[in-house]
Image: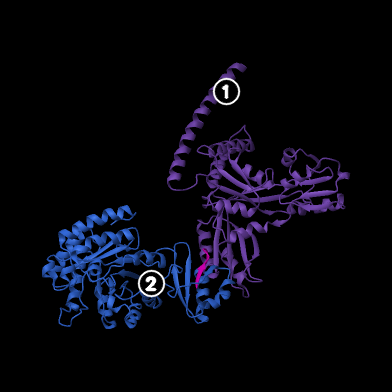
């Protein structure tokens, strides 16, 4: 067959694409309408995961799975903005890692609102000023972002998705490494690059900023200052990358949470986050974990935080595999409930990849 | 003081707070809302114990109650209390009309009245079996026989029944026949009766004494609440003033005032409040407009033949007109009848 003939066929297929995409859009809008009547949000991370996985399983090639996944993601993101643009509040300013995580999850067709700090994100969400919030929760090198966990103590917001982002830190600046006298960055980023800084910039003054993007902004105004931040921040603030990948661990990941007002639907591969408090006595914490073992539930994280009410009294944050509506999870949680003073399900959400 | 428990607190957590309250020698009064559980801690100087509870993670906040009446006050509960009696909800959007004869005279007359008031839109049947009368020579009511008629007519029509108890000794028997126990104006400060009423499982309709202040009415309600019965309906039925052209002066102000001071529902009795049939319709409209959660009305098929209070009972046609009029008023103030 000739090229012309193939092109004709491609055009034919593309026309059908457009037709099918619009048919799909009509159905999505109908679902939006129903959900709106029920007062629910139409964003469903659980459903997105199911849709993606089903299509990947159908894939016979020659299109590789990874590329198909990208295409599906783009389509899902476009459809998400079909009815109206979702308002997403994130830990700003623009070009922070949280911003990147937000874009990874919601795509380019959302309205992104930068917040000054984590409390402001929770505040704006509680006031209904945004549909979803994006906050960092833990880093694979540095551990938890305690401020985020503390916010959940008094908030009724739910975790509805998680985003895991590989975080690459670069030293940005306007001059050479030898001229750098001062380094700006967020305490988390500084901690993740501590060894590199000791080796290469031992005499530089380290200044903490509220975000990596803010650090880049400050460094852009001073000739002998650098910032630890992302590539996106470099282009946004007109800086060059003096040294790339300066993070101490080559597997440096940060986990972000998408917070909303509703629990996410089951996707088949979910995680659940809970918060509980107990009366302090011998074996109490052990007792709390027994139901999970009994029902063969895999705990992925346990973290304690002070209650801030009484000295040496703690609340526990536990993450485990499974959805709150799964039978074994329900059983374990009802057993746990009988033993503890306080139990809140912060969210069940599709496991991030 | 009022302890507000954090949403997410388990039964075991709530029990821990209750145990601590008891350990300190106070009485806990628990109110479970849709979102939050609140515990009233009542007792002299209860507020001095606030630090013990403030240190608990599961305690969201502590609010002192400044008023002398604690459990009856808005400080204790921000939302209006809703009372459910069979299918009838008192304190909600619907203005509940309780109507019937002043006293139960015989079964036929009671049934005739009940059917009529139900058809016109009343939700609860009223009728006296034990009557507090000014004169010992006046008709004193049919007693238990009257209660039996009330129960039977209630069964036939499906209307719940409210009737008065005058003495703690009558409570048990009245509770076995009636759905709501009324404590009359003359007994509003009969503290032994109030305490006993507080031990009953049936809702109490507490009428304001004719020479009592709103504060005294709420203090009397506090007696019932603090004895463990949280289902109290307050009733404005007129007070004695220098004005002698009506039997009492119906204090409409108290309806609006109680709305601010207390979470308890409040109903109005324009029949006793005015003592005059000609005024009942107008004052019913006024009561609904002022925000009353219900009306208590005396209706008699032949008011001129009534054995008691005939001069303030309305006839069937008047009652029907009254219902039509208050429907419009209710609609205008965002309620329904």
What residue is pinned by disc 1? A10
Q: How many marks?
A: 2
10 Å crowding of disc 1: few (<14), some (14-19), many (20+) = few
- Residue occupying the point 62% across, 75% down: A281
Residue at label 2? B230
* Residue in view at x 53 percent, y 74 percent: B16
Q: Colour of chain B?
A: blue
Chain coloured purple here:
A
Q: Nearer the viewer, residue B153 or B91?
A: B91
Comparing marks 2 and 1, which lies closer to the viewer? 2
Which region shows up in magenta? B1-9
Mark 2: give few (<14), some (14-19) or many (20+) Cα within 10 Å.
many
Quadrant in the picture for residue B200 = bottom left
Q: Which of the chains bears the disc numbered 2?
A: B
User: Is residue B7 highlighted in magenta?
Assistant: yes
Would you say B108 lies left or right of B164 here? left
Residue B305 lies, with reference to residue A2, above or below; the image says: below
Q: Secondary structure at mark 1?
A: helix
């Amino acid at each position: 067959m000739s090229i012309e003939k193939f092109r004709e066929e491609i055009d034919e297929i593309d026309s059908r694409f457009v037709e099918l995409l619009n048919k799909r859009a009509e159905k999505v809008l109908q679902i939006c309408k129903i959900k709106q009547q029920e007062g629910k949000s139409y964003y469903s991370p659980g459903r997105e995961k199911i849709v993606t996985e089903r299509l990947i399983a159908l894939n016979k090639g020659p299109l590789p799975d990874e590329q198909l996944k990208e295409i599906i993601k783009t389509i899902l993101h476009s459809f998400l903005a079909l009815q109206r643009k979702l308002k997403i509040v994130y830990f700003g300013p623009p070009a922070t890692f949280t911003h990147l995580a937000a874009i990874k999850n919601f795509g380019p067709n959302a309205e992104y609102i930068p917040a000054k700090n984590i409390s402001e994100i929770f505040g704006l969400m509680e006031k209904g000023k945004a549909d979803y919030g994006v906050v960092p929760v833990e880093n694979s090198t540095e551990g938890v972002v305690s401020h985020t966990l503390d916010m959940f103590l008094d908030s009724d917001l739910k975790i509805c998705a998680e985003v895991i982002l590989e975080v690459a830190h670069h030293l940005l600046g306007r001059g050479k490494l030898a001229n750098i006298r001062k380094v700006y960055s967020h305490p988390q980023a500084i901690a993740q690059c501590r060894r590199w800084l000791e080796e290469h910039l031992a005499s530089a003054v380290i200044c903490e900023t509220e975000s990596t993007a803010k650090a880049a902004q400050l460094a852009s105004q001073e000739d002998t200052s650098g910032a630890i931040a992302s590539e996106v921040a470099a282009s946004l603030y007109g800086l060059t990358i003096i040294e790339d990948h300066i993070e101490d661990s080559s597997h440096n990941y940060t986990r972000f949470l998408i917070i909303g007002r509703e629990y996410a639907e089951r996707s088949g591969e979910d995680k659940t986050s809970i918060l509980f408090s107990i009366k302090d006595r011998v074996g109490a914490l052990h007792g709390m974990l027994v139901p999970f073992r009994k029902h063969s539930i895999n705990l992925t994280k346990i973290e304690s935080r002070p209650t801030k009410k009484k000295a040496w009294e703690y609340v526990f944050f536990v993450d485990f595999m499974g959805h709150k509506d799964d039978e074994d999870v329900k059983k374990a949680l009802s057993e746990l409930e009988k033993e503890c003073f306080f139990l809140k399900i912060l969210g069940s959400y599709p496991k991030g990849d | 003081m009022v302890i507000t428990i954090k949403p997410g607190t388990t039964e075991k957590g709530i029990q821990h707070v209750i145990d601590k309250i008891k350990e300190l020698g106070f009485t806990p009064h628990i109110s479970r809302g849709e979102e939050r559980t609140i515990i009233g801690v009542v007792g002299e100087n209860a507020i001095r114990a606030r630090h013990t509870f403030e240190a608990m993670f599961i305690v969201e906040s502590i609010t002192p109650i400044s008023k002398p009446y604690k459990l009856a006050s808005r400080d204790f509960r921000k939302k209006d209390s809703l009372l459910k009696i069979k299918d009838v909800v008192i304190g909600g959007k619907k203005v509940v009309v309780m109507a019937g004869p002043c006293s139960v005279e015989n079964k036929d007359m009671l049934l005739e009245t009940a059917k009529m008031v139900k058809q016109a839109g009343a939700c609860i049947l009223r009728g006296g079996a034990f009557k507090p009368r000014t004169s010992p020579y006046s008709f004193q009511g049919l007693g238990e026989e009257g209660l039996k008629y009330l129960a039977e007519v209630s069964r036939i029509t499906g209307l719940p029944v409210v009737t008065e108890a005058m003495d703690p000794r009558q409570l048990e028997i009245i509770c076995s026949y009636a759905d709501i126990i009324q404590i009359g104006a003359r007994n509003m400060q009969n503290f032994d009766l109030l305490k006993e009423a507080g031990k009953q499982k049936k809702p109490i309709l507490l009428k304001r004494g004719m020479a009592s202040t709103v504060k005294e009415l709420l203090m009397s309600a506090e007696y019932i609440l603090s004895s463990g019965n949280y289902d109290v309906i307050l009733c404005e039925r007129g007070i004695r003033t220098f004005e002698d052209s009506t039997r009492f002066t119906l204090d409409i102000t108290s309806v609006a005032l109680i709305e601010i001071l207390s979470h308890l529902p409040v109903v109005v009795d324009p029949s006793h409040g005015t003592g005059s049939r000609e005024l009942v319709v107008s004052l019913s409209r006024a009561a609904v407009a002022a925000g009353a959660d219900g009306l208590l009305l005396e209706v008699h098929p032949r008011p001129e033949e009534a054995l008691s209070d005939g001069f303030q009972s309305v006839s069937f046609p008047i009652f029907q007109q009254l219902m039509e009029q208050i429907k419009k008023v209710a609609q205008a103030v965002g309620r329904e009848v």
